[in-house]
Amino acid sequence: MDDVRKTLIAVLASHDSVGKNNELAGLFNELYRNHKEILDNFHFLFTGGTFGRIVRGKDTHRPPRRDLQMIKKPARDFIKSNATILPDRKEGGITILANLIVQRQCSIVWPFLSPITTHWLNPENLALMRLCDLWNVKRLMNAESVRACFRDEIERAMRRNPQVIPLKITLGTPETEEGLTLPPWPRAEKPRYNQKYYEVRLPDRARHPPEFWGQFERQTIALIAHDAMKDRMVDFAIEYENELCKFGRILATGTTGRDVENACRNLRELKKVRRCLSGPKGGDIEIATEILFGRCHVVVFFIDPLHPHAHMDDIRVVFAACMAEIPNNDVRMLTNEVQAREWIEGAVRLR
């Protein structure tokens, strides 16, 4: 049987705007009524909160509101059978979506964000918008833009990088054996109606026992440095090369990883360093996604506090992943050089 390939459309709406959610629900009703055959060429990625509000009628952020509208049957059943659900925003769903953009899997996004509420100013959303423009993703931010696409551009949209369904989530650096591909879990809300959709779940985690933090070969450490701090990161890696060699994996954004490898022969020969993209091109998002899936345990980030960065929101996404409200999220964060040196002297070198 041939693989089913469909173009992905990511869908999200501001949780704090009833109007934008209702606009999105009404749009799906209209498209199903007028373009059902065309819709079948696409597979929809929903963030958990948006899916809950407009498909399931359950708002994860607040009690149900009578003025919040759902997609109507039979459009709702059609969408359920042709959707993959990402986690809620507070669990990293927007970050995982941004990673799908960086990995060139998703090339159309419908971000129905309200300009008069604060939700669209969250770092995850701002990073997502920036990466859409960087990677030439078609970004349709209101109902009329979507209607115009279906009216004038839909043939081209249907050919925008189709993906195998069920979708696979790629973690790590795909060119190495460390890459990990995760198929979403199939889920049926009402099996008798066969309303099956796919759901991307974060792994269940148990809190690491104290002895784990001395078993460095089981740990992944991320090294990230702003441009003005890269020389300091290289000096740090040279001084503590033996300690870094103890770790199972070292993740690094592109330029930092290259500079560290060039300066540290042992790390290079042991092939410890896994280079992601450069930070501005999405490397920070790739590392943040590894953190969300429990595959990165220590983050060393040399921040430049004096100069602004065009991708500052991506950097905040890394911090958000470390602090995400998910069970047993016990990532160790070291956000300046003094902190990192004291940690590696006390926690790694002495062991």
Image: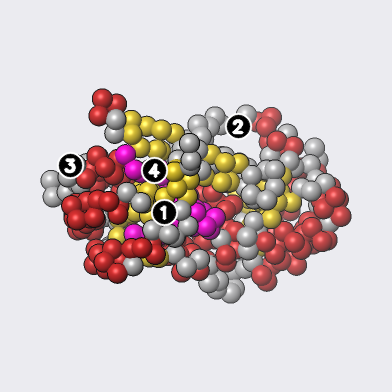
Q: Which residues are magenta?
A: 81-110
Q: In front: mark 4 or mark 1?
A: 1
Tag on residue 73? 3
Circle 1: residue type = Thr
Mark 4 or mark 3, which is nearer the start of the sequence?
A: 3
Could you tell whether 194 is left or right of 317 in the image?
left
Residue 262 vertical placement versus 333 (above, below): below
Q: Residue 112, located in which quarter of the rendered image? A: bottom left
Residue 45 vertical placement versus 302 (above, below): above
The residue singled out by tag 2 in the image is 208
How far separated are the C-alphas under marks 2 and 4?
Answer: 30 Å
Residue at 73% in and 34% down: 215
The residue singled out by tag 1 in the image is 7
Whether pointer 2 and pointer 4 mark residues with C-beta atoms closer than 8 Å, the reply is: no
Mark 1 or mark 4, which is nearer the start of the sequence?
A: 1
Mark 1 or mark 2, which is nearer the start of the sequence?
A: 1
Q: Please state the horizontal and vertical placement of residue 22, each as a whole percent of the image.
A: 19, 54
Residue at 48% in and 45% down: 164
How far separated are the C-alphas under marks 3 and 4?
Answer: 19 Å
How far separated are the C-alphas under marks 2 and 3?
Answer: 45 Å
Q: In front: mark 1 or mark 3?
A: 1
Whether pointer 3 and pointer 4 mark residues with C-beta atoms closer than 8 Å, the reply is: no
Residue at 30% in and 54% down: 38
How far separated are the C-alphas under marks 1 and 3?
Answer: 23 Å
Mark 4 is surrounded, within 10 Å at the Cα level, by few (under 14), some (14 to 19) or many (20 or more) other residues, namely many
- In the image as oriented, which residue stretches furthest toward the top? 192
How far separated are the C-alphas under marks 4 and 1?
Answer: 12 Å
Say what secondary structure mark 1 lies in.
Answer: strand
Given residues 339 and 206, the one toward you in this image is 206
Say what secondary structure mark 4 lies in.
Answer: strand
